[in-house]
Image (cartoon, grey):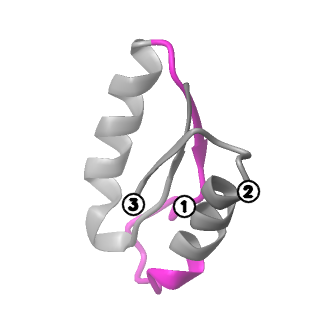
Amino acid sequence: MKIAMAGDHAGFALKKEIKEMLEKEGHEIVDFGPFSEEGCDLPDFIYPASLAVSKGEVDRGIF
């Protein structure tokens, strides 16, 4: 399954952990960010990820 993932800086560590677990199970992850714990705005990452879900570019999203 192809899964979009996105969040904010506060959830970065958990996103990374979940991403690794899902990849071990054979899922393809499209990571929309963030890519560090540096402060950021949630919509900058959630919006493009949700568009990918709505357009059918990925099967599911975890935000």
Mark seen at residue 63: 3
Q: Determine the residue positioned at 47% across, 86% down.
A: 41
Please determine whether, in this image, residue 58 is positioned above or below residue 25. Answer: below
The C terminus sits in image quarter:
bottom left
Neighbor class of circle 2 (other Cα within 10 Å; few <14, some 14-19, many 20+) is few
Residue 13 lies, in percent from the top left, at 29, 52
Mark 1 highlights which residue?
33
Q: How far apart are marks 1 and 3 (CA)?
A: 10 Å
Considering the numbered disc 1 on the image, is that residue within a helix, a strand or a loop?
A: loop
Residue 8 lies, in percent from the top left, at 39, 72
**Marks 2, 3: nearer the viewer:** 2
Horizontal side of 20 relative to 45 (left or right) equals left
Residue 54 lies, in percent from the top left, at 64, 60
Mark seen at residue 55: 2
| The residue stretch that appears in magenta | 26-44
**Marks 1, 3: nearer the viewer:** 3
Residue contact at pointers 1 and 3, CB within 8 angstroms: no
**Marks 2, 1: nearer the viewer:** 2
Mark seen at residue 56: none
Residue contact at pointers 2 and 1, CB within 8 angstroms: no
Q: How far apart are marks 2 and 3 (CA)?
A: 16 Å
Q: Determine the residue positioned at 52% across, 71% down.
A: 46
Horizontal side of 52 relative to 17 (left or right) equals right
Please determine whether, in this image, residue 16 is positioned above or below residue 20. Answer: below
Residue type indicated by callout 2: Lys
Considering the numbered disc 2 on the image, is that residue within a helix, a strand or a loop?
A: loop
Q: Determine the residue positioned at 40% across, 13% down.
A: 25
Q: Is residue 41 magenta?
A: yes
